[in-house]
């Protein structure tokens, strides 16, 4: 199967930055409020909705809200009547069930409304839409089941890249050929066959859009390292909510074969992090930021032995809100220390990778339409951050982005910082920068860099 940006992708519940949104299956409709029914489950007195994606849709003459769960705990994609929006807005954890019922009853003048509202909220809880004991049990069970698995299967095969090996190899080879031509045009010489850079930065945007730039980063790795190679990959945890780090011990399967996880390395880091190590592991299940890096590593190295250490990083939003540095955050410092100590204790040749994108701006991300002047201004922000990273200065990287309050949504903010702290790579150089445009004038910027 030949997969191009114009081909209809396979079914997926994922929203990939840079990919076109998919048509969803017709959801089950939950109408608020319904008939009263008994429920043995104790509802929270102050109900709070979880972080869910709510998308307005039209079904004939009816307006609905389709609910999607980034964590994948909730089954299916239920739809609520648009009339439920007023109630949903009250479910922020600060308004009691009694007060919600009283407010709606005062509006409707219907004495039956209290039971109807309670029943509707009970339905939301049964659907695992609330922060509640029921949801926590479901989350714990999902975590246990996923952690017990040894293999992480590809989430994007057949969506962002071909699921057949031959077609995938053809696509990746074309990307590496393009990258090699651009390297030659720049005057840069090919690296030695056994060269292993200390670190590389590569995009994680849909490979159909920026695969050649991803390949350009991995051209800095020789095809035949002199010894087995360990690759520590820091990816953006797009669905890593409320946690800074997520480890996994899973081997990554792709159409090119299996990338073996260095479980000894992961175990040492996990022992140092304690309960925080695997709390967010479910985020690995559908995350693309590491999966794409593995593909290019596999094609570049072929049959040469290497292992991976997959680490997802959460956001720095609360640090910006509190005007703190990552050095003030215990979770960040614990991860940096643990990774450094694991590398020192286990030895072996180690390369670090940051699988990251830069700015996300435009209508798709809540902004107005972009023009050339705005895109140039975004480019200045990106270039300043990239220059700090290429200097090997993690603190300068954080400062440049933080001073702008991460206004352009650089989703590689935390992984790049962590990679620079762990690798301590010294000075590097930019390999390429691009602004990938979308139909509605939205834009995602990407870059590649190496620290030799």
Image (cartoon, grey):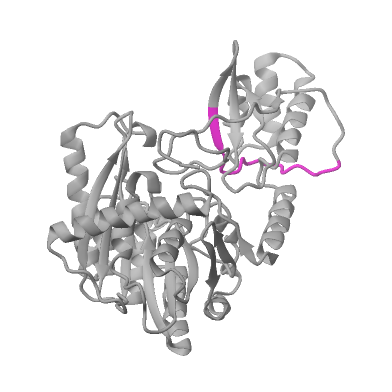
Q: Looking at the image, which residue is at 30% across and 62% down?
A: 217
In-image side of 225 versus 121 (left or right): left
Tell me where residue 186 appears, x and y as whole percent: 14, 59
Q: How many discs appear?
A: 0
Indicate yes or no whether the magenta region holds residue 51: yes
Q: Is residue 163 above or below residue 347?
A: above
Q: Is residue 342 above or below residue 289?
A: below
Among the 4 quarters of the image, the one containing residue 394: bottom left
**Observer able to see residue 357:** no
| Nearest the eye: 360 or 192 | 192
Magenta-colored segment: predominant secondary structure: loop
Q: Looking at the image, which residue is at 71% across and 14% down?
A: 109
The range drawn in magenta is 40-55
Tell me where residue 5 appears, x and y as whole percent: 40, 37
* Residue extending farthest left: 187
Tell me where residue 39 appears, x and y as whole percent: 85, 38
In-image side of 291 versus 328 (left or right): right
Q: Is residue 47 above or below residue 305?
A: above
Q: Is residue 29 above or below residue 1?
A: above
In-image side of 97 versus 306 (left or right): right
| Nearest the eye: 206 or 240 | 206
| Nearest the eye: 32 or 411 | 411
* Residue extending farthest top: 61
Tell me where residue 26 appears, x and y as whole percent: 64, 26
**Observer able to see residue 329:** yes
In-image side of 24 versus 429 (left or right): right
| Nearest the eye: 243 or 290 | 290
The C terminus - image quarter: bottom left
């Amino acid at each position: 199967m030949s997969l191009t940006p114009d081909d209809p992708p396979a079914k997926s519940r994922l929203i990939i930055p840079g990919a076109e949104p998919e048509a969803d299956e017709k959801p089950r409709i939950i109408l608020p409020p319904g008939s009263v029914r008994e429920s043995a489950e104790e509802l929270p007195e102050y109900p709070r909705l979880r972080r869910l994606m709510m998308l307005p849709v039209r079904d004939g003459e009816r307006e609905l809200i389709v609910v999607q769960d980034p964590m994948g705990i909730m089954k299916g994609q239920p739809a609520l009547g648009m009339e439920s929006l007023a109630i949903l807005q009250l479910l922020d954890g600060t308004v009691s069930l009694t007060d919600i019922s009283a407010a709606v009853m005062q509006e409707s003048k219907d004495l039956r409304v209290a039971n109807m509202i309670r029943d509707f909220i009970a339905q939301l809880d049964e659907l695992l839409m609330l922060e509640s004991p029921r949801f926590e049990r479901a989350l714990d069970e999902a975590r246990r089941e996923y952690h017990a698995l040894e293999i992480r299967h590809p989430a994007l095969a057949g969506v962002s890249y071909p699921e057949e090996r031959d077609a995938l190899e053809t696509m990746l080879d074309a990307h590496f050929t393009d990258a090699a031509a651009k390297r030659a045009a720049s005057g840069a010489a090919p690296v030695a066959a056994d060269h292993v850079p200390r670190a590389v930065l590569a995009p994680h945007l849909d490979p159909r859009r920026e695969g050649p730039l991803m390949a350009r980063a991995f051209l800095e790795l020789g095809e035949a390292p002199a010894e087995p190679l360990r690759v520590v990959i820091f990816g953006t945890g797009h669905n890593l909510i409320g946690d800074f780090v997520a480890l996994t011990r899973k081997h990554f399967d792709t159409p090119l074969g299996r990338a073996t996880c260095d479980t000894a390395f992961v175990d040492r880091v996990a022992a140092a992090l304690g309960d925080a190590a695997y709390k967010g592991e479910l985020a690995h299940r559908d995350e693309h930021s590491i999966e794409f890096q593995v593909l290019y590593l596999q094609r570049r190295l072929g049959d040469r032995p290497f292992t991976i250490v997959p680490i997802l990083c959460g956001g720095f939003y609360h640090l910006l809100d509190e005007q703190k540095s990552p050095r003030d955050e215990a979770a960040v410092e614990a991860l940096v220390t643990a990774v450094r100590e694991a590398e020192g204790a286990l030895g072996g040749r180690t390369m670090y990778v940051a699988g990251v994108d830069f700015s996300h701006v435009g209508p798709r991300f809540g902004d107005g339409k972009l023009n050339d002047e705005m895109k140039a201004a975004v480019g200045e922000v990106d270039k300043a951050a990239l220059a700090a990273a290429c200097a090997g200065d993690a603190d300068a990287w954080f400062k440049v982005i933080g001073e702008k309050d991460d206004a352009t949504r650089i989703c590689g903010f935390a992984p790049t910082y962590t990679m620079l702290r762990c690798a301590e790579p010294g000075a590097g150089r930019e390999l390429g920068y691009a602004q990938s445009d979308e139909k509605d004038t939205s834009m995602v910027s990407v870059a590649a860099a190496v620290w030799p």
